[in-house]
Image: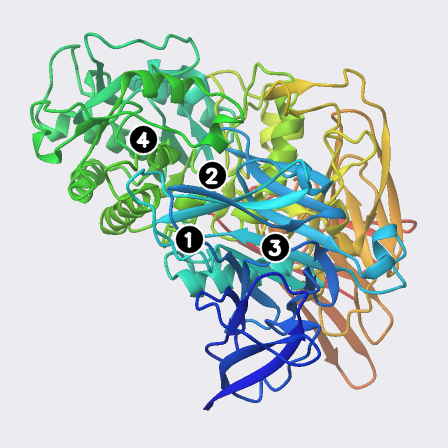
């Protein structure tokens, strides 16, 4: 590699004096010429000096284009992505630096005085292109927004996906060319965090802030990563993995250990008891589910178990359905409700009489595998009480949250307001590992297997005096994850109220994240919003962790709607039913009698054709969510129209009380990467089974099935690649037809041919879990069906090609049947 310097002549019309400086493998950055020197020839053109390391990758330069990467360039003040215009009127102080690890990716930043604890910079206009973004509509949570212009991009946008077209394609003329997608990821840089927002001039702006008035200096060159390509899901994954390599502060989901709670049905105490939960309530909840034949194999003891108190002069938050946000933690051990023969005002110091006697009883009597408990990232909502006996060594001090202007411009929040008024007892960041480790080691010794860590975004409001929000969050998250690793070997943590990039880009180990605002059982506007928000948030969040769709109620007017969504979400499935208030017919579609679930493999995300439509507000679009099993795909379709987050009222509202019936289509290509679970000879044909309709349809390649849904209706489709053998038999295993995710039951699938000289026989051999009605498509009637080497009775429908058998409840947990369908 040889150093070189080139001189290029550029038109005098370039505003200001510039020097283009290249580093690494031909990176070209656009910067102001602080030295004030330039040279003009007789034709009035300026000479621009480019210094760089010369390699084969950087061998061209032209007058009209400053090349900054193989797929990302700035041409005539336009940001071009794979030759397509995405942003116009790009300011001359915008710096674009190509990634050294991905072909079609680059970092965007700005050249400025780089001073100030909060700065806003425009990076170009977005007009006439469809986009989808996720933004924080309140302190803790994100939701989606779609649009076609920069002014529609909200404050606190943390992810932006743009559908790019070339030239006149902006007017809808596609010229038969492949779509191009560009993803914009605002990043952490040093002690600063960047987000995107739009203004009235349709400019996209980068907002950078430190969260501390004393932290003012930043580099500014790597504030946003831009990735591009033709497959939106691959573009997003590759972009996040590139940022992972660049920042080296977090890990992609694929490299994290998934806790076992994801694979079992569970129960959470929150909606059943709120903070009034006690030992007897926990036992009642587990007994009630067990009695109905769907036992909970994990339990989350939510808020209500800790030792807390309010300051004498504190302002209490009163609600029947929430905590008192003014309370602070006064001891790391459980309160009297969870001590054997506990009495209020008295603490039992014997560990055997605390949580240990509860966990031992629960695990022995109810065969519960995992017990999690709730706590806030700062201990409790109001933090750790300063100076309280036994906790002095955590050096907790009162801090008063200050939220950013972007957050303040969106939905207000009662919890944040209460905490800001009362202050928060913040554990010294240098001692927070000791706090977590002592808390978690006690819990682990008492038989607790993990924690749900809530209120995580509060850290961003407490950065003043601690080096800023990014530095404080990183110290806390590093300490938290170190404690989890040391005390809960199954990586037992669920992250909650954590939708900010301060935490996401600092998560090395945490593998499960609550993916949206809460399930609100009493808010009729919230249910369709919940499904849509989780799906679109997961496009971004699913690159970091496995989504948790939250608890729900099995006995509720929208229970089936919520249950179907969770079945395809790839998430843990758990309810918060009050004891005795269950719909076991619904639960049997989600969980098997041994308490295991048929979890799909990936985070459930909207299908490609839904990425830029608005299934909550446009009155015409259905929401389709896809996922994969080992040998099939699954697509859930939901009519979510009628309610959404209102940017004027700044809350969830029903905007259409009578949304209409909507028709859409289902296609095999709705399932991303379906070819990965098909055999190498797959020709694109599929068999599609509709759960609600109960229909089996043979779907040739590129064909579609119409689907019509009324308001708040849903359907779940199992999509199975067809296997064809030499004798012309076509076969597609559907799975357990009474379960929402039918295909999740199939664990192994092989085609076996036996040549006995004059005759050839073919068998499809499977291993599968569960019980009930098993179904498969077969173009010909099988000769026999064997289960565990025993021939069993089967039914065959000539018209649909459906083969069915009934499987009894296995005696062993996670038992796998050996099924052979023979021809």
Q: Is residue 773 visible?
A: no
Query: Mark 2 near mark 3, Cβ–Cβ under 8 Å?
Result: no
First-in-chain label (1 vs 3): 3
Residue 171 in percent (x, y) is at: 87, 51
Specify which label sits upstream in the sequence, 1 or 4.
1
User: How far apart are the alpha carbons under marks 1 and 3?
Assistant: 15 Å
Q: Residue shown at 46%/78% (left/top)?
A: 24
The answer to whether any part of residue 566 appears in the image is: yes
Work out whether mark 1 precedes mark 2 in sequence or the reverse, and give the earlier one: 1
Above or below, 115 relative to 151? below
Indicate the quadrant where residue 255 lies.
bottom left
Marks 1 and 2, how far apart in space?
A: 30 Å
Distance (Cα) linking label 4 and label 3: 43 Å
Secondary structure of the residue carrying numbered label 3: loop
Circle 1 SS class = loop
Closer to the camera: disc 1 or disc 4? 1
Q: Secondary structure at mark 4?
A: strand
Residue at the right extreme of this rendering: 799
Up the image or down, 775 lies above or below 652; here it is below
Mark 1 touches mark 4? (CB < 8 Å): no
Q: Which mark is residue 499?
A: 2
């Amino acid at each position: 590699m040889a150093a070189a310097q080139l001189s290029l002549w550029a038109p005098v019309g370039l505003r200001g004096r510039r020097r283009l400086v290249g580093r690494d493998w031909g990176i070209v950055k656009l910067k102001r010429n602080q030295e004030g020197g330039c040279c003009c020839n007789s034709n009035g053109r300026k000479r621009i000096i480019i210094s760089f390391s010369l390699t084969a990758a950087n061998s061209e330069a032209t007058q009209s284009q400053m090349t900054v990467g193989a797929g990302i360039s700035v041409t005539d003040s336009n940001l071009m992505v794979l030759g397509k215009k995405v942003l116009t009127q790009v300011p001359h102080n915008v710096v674009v630096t190509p990634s050294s690890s991905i072909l079609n990716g680059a970092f965007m930043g700005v050249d400025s005085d780089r001073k100030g604890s909060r700065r806003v910079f425009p990076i170009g206009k977005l007009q006439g292109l469809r986009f989808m973004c996720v933004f924080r509509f309140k302190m803790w949570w994100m939701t989606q927004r779609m649009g076609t212009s920069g002014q529609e991009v909200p404050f606190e946008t943390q992810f932006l996906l743009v559908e790019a077209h070339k030239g006149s394609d902006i007017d809808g003329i596609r010229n038969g060319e492949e779509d191009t997608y560009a993803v914009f990821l605002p990043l952490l840089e040093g002690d600063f965090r960047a987000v995107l927002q739009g203004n009235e001039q349709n400019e996209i702006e980068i907002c950078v802030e430190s969260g501390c008035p004393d932290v003012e200096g930043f580099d500014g060159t790597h504030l946003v990563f831009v990735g591009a390509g033709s497959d939106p899901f691959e573009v997003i994954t590759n972009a996040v993995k590139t940022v992972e390599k660049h920042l080296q502060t977090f890990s992609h989901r694929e490299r994290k250990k998934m806790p076992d709670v994801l694979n079992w049905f569970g129960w959470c105490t929150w909606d059943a008891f709120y903070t009034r939960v006690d030992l007897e309530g926990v036992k009642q909840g587990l007994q009630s589910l067990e009695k109905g034949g769907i036992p909970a194999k994990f339990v989350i003891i939510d808020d209500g178990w800790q030792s807390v108190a309010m300051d004498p002069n504190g302002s209490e938050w009163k609600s029947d359905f929430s905590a008192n946000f003014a309370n602070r933690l006064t001891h790391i051990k459980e309160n009297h409700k969870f001590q054997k023969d506990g009495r209020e005002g008295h603490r039992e110091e014997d560990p055997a009489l605390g949580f240990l006697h509860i966990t031992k009883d629960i695990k022995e009597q109810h065969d519960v595998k995992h017990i999690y408990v709730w706590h806030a990232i700062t201990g409790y909502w109001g933090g750790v009480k300063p100076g309280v006996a036994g906790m002095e060594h955590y050096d907790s001090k009162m801090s008063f949250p200050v939220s950013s202007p972007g957050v303040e411009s969106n939905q207000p929040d009662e919890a944040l307001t209460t905490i800001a008024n009362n202050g928060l007892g913040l554990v010294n960041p240098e001692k927070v590992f000791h706090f977590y480790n002592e808390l978690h080691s006690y819990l682990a010794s008492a038989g607790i297997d993990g924690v749900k860590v809530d209120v995580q975004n509060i850290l961003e409001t407490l950065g003043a005096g601690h080096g800023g929000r990014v530095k404080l969050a990183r110290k806390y998250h590093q300490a938290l994850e170190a404690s989890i690793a040391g005390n809960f070997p199954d990586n037992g943590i669920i992250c909650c109220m954590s939708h900010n990039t301060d935490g996401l880009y600092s998560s090395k180990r945490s593998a499960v994240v609550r993916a949206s605002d809460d399930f609100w059982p009493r808010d009729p506007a919230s249910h369709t919003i919940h499904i849509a928000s989780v799906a679109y948030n997961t496009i971004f969040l699913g690159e970091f962790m496995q989504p948790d769709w939250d608890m729900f109620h099995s006995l509720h007017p929208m229970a089936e709607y919520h249950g179907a969504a969770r079945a395809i979400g790839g998430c843990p499935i758990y309810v918060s039913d009050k004891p005795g208030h269950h719909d076991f017919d619904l639960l049997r579609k989600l969980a098997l009698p041994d308490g295991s679930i048929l979890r799909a493999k990936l985070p459930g995300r909207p299908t490609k054709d839904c990425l830029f439509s608005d299934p909550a507000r446009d009155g015409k679009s259905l929401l389709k969510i896809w996922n994969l099993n080992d040998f099939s795909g699954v697509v859930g379709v939901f009519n979510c129209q009628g309610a959404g987050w209102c940017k004027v009222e700044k809350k969830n509202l029903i905007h259409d009380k009578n949304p209409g019936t909507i028709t859409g289509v289902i296609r095999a290509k709705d399932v991303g990467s379906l070819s990965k679970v098909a055999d190498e000879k797959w020709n694109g044909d599929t068999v599609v089974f509709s759960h609600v309709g109960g229909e089996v349809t043979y779907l040739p390649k590129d064909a579609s099935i119409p689907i019509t849904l009324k308001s708040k209706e849903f359907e779940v489709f199992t999509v199975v690649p067809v296997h064809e053998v030499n004798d012309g038999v076509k076969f597609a295993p559907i799975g357990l037809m009474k379960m929402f995710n039918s295909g999740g039951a199939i664990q192994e699938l092989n085609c076996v041919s036996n040549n006995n000289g004059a005759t050839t026989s073919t068998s499809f051999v499977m291993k599968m879990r569960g019980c009930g009605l098993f179904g498969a498509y077969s173009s010909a009637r099988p000769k026999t069906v064997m289960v565990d080497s025993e021939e069993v009775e089967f039914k065959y429908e000539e018209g649909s090609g459906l083969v069915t058998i009934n499987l009894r409840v296995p005696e062993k947990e996670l038992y796998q049947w050996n099924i052979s369908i023979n021809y």
